[in-house]
Each structure stands twice: as structure tokens, then as C-alpha cells.
Image (cartoon, rainbow, N blue to C red):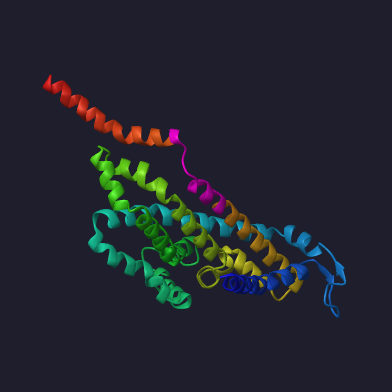
Amino acid sequence: MKTSLSFHKVIVGLLVIYLVIPLAATLLFSVAGKWDHTILPESFTMKWYIELFHDERFYGALQHTLFLIFVTVGLGVVIMLPTIFIITVYFSKWEGWLQTVAMLPYGIPPIVGAVGLIKVYSNGPLPITGTPWILVGAYFITILPFMYQGIRNSLRTVNAVQLVDAAELLGATKFQAFRTVVFPNIISGILVSTLLSVALLFSEFAFANLLVGGRFETIQIYLADKLNSSGHLTSAIVITYYSIILLVTGTVLKLTFKKDKVPSPSSKKRSVFFINKPFRQKNTALEGENS
């Protein structure tokens, strides 16, 4: 047992080293003043970060990227959450079709999808090619598998069908059952799906470059444009990009762990009271009629 555990630790350690070394080298190169003939930089400077943070294009690209991510992920949660819940709980026979549709983006290469979108939306009633809205639509399709898998797995874990049946048996409406019983139990899965979607959209380049290009510059297009100008500046952009991802990841994980904490007895009593309230009201009305 100890030998097996040690072997697993060695494998995990080697994997961590393999993943960290490129980031560490990129970080060193982003603060290196001169690095030609030595293993480590001969001098260090913050020149490249100062240049980056004084570039208005960087802030514009970051703002565009965050706008696209917030709109796309928000639409994904608002549309997919009730859809998956309704299909899973009330129309389970359609679940296979929903899963098939949600998994389709895995089989469509971004270049093929972008060419098709350009042909469809260049003319006609919705000429949105070159605008951020076509990118929102493409991003929404891209994150469908992550949204579906995360939310669906959460509903399976909490056994949403039985939870809804129990809540309705106690007198709660369908909306009350979803809002007060199911949603608080699956919010961790929603946050994880959101995190995966944000990380994917932060690194997406093909759709952004082909559908909007420089007309709505994102952080990836900005990075590609700076690749030929300075390797040090490009490294500073990459480190800043990863820092933003780590900040978002840490925030989402903190919210996830906070939601996973066992609720206090008082909160449990409040939930039970709210669910049982319609049931008690019905019993009171019946007793009044009988008297």
C-alpha cells in the first residue's frame, strides 16, 4: 500500500513539474532584461509589464473578452439550466435528443463552423457577420457540452426527480420545488460548468479571428498580433492572461466550497418551514370547511 501511494505521488509530482516548467520559463522571460548565454536571466526588469499596462489596446481587448464571456456564459446558464431541468424531470424521453444536440459541437471543427456561420449570416435578415453578436452565438454553441454535462451530472447526483416529487407532495409548486430545493443543491455543479466555460472562452482564437478579427479585438487576437513584435511582451501578456484565469478560478472554487458546506440547523428549519407552509395552509382550510 505504501509503495503504491509513493508511486502515485511520484507520478503526480512529475505531472506538476511538467505543467509548471513552461509557465515558470514564461514568467522568467517576461521579467528578463538580458537572457542570452546563461541558464537564468542575467538581469530583471518590469519594462514589458509597464509597456503592456500602458497600452490601451490591451485594456480594450480584455474588456471585449470579458464582455463576450459574461454574456455567453450568462445566456448559457439562463437557457440551459431550465431546459435541462424540465427535460430531466418531466420529459425524460427527450433526454437522449438533448444530449445529442449538446454534444454536437465536439464534432464540428471551429474553422468549418466559422465558414458556415459567415455564409449564413453575411446576408439575409440577420447580417451580423463581423459583429460581437455572431461571436456570442458561436461561443454559446461551443460551451454547450460543458453546460450540459455539469448541470445534468448535478441533477443526477441529487436525484432531482425524487426531490421534486417530495416537494410537490408537501404542497410546493413546481417553481418552488426548483427554486428552494433543487437549485441550492446543484449550484456547485453550475459554478463548475461556468468555470470550465470561462476557461475555454478565454483561450478561444479560431472563431474570434475568423468571425470578427480586428473589428472586435479579443485578448487572443491581441496576443497573436504581438507575437511578431516582442517575445518578452508576449510572455508578459501570457502571464497576465493566466493570472486572470487563476483569479477567476479561485473565486469560483471559493464559491463552490462555500456552497458545499453543511447548512446550519436553523437554515434547515427555515427550508422545511417554507416547503411545509402550503401544506399546512391546505390542512387549515380543510379543517375550517369540516367545522
In the figure, 16 relative to 168: above or below? below
Q: Main secondary structure of the magenta part?
A: helix
- Residue lying furthest right in this view? 42
Residue at the (64%, 63%) spot, across then down: 242
| Quadrant occupied by the N terminus | bottom right
Q: Residue 38: x, y in percent?
A: 85, 78
Quarter residue 143 falls in: bottom left
| Residue 289 inside the magenta-drawn segment | no
Closer to the camera, 75 or 126? 75
| Quadrant occupied by the C terminus | top left
Q: Can residue 230 be seen by looking at this rendering?
A: no
Closer to the camera, 288 or 230? 288
Residue at the (59%, 68%) spot, across then down: 214
In the figure, 179 relative to 45: above or below? above
Q: Can residue 276 be seen by looking at this rendering?
A: yes
Residue 198 as seen in the image, left or right of residue 239: left
In the figure, 231 relative to 267: above or below? below
Q: How many marks?
A: 0
Over which residues does the magenta segment extend?
Answer: 253-266
Residue 285 as seen in the image, left or right of residue 239: left
- Residue lying furthest top in this view? 291
Q: Residue 210: x, y in percent?
A: 52, 73
In the figure, 191 relative to 30: above or below? above
Q: Residue 10: x, y in percent?
A: 64, 73
- Residue lying furthest front in this view? 1
Closer to the camera, 48 or 269? 269
Residue 155 as seen in the image, left or right of residue 59: left
Q: Residue 79: x, y in percent?
A: 37, 55
Residue at the (39%, 62%) spot, across then down: 148
- Residue lying furthest left in this view? 290
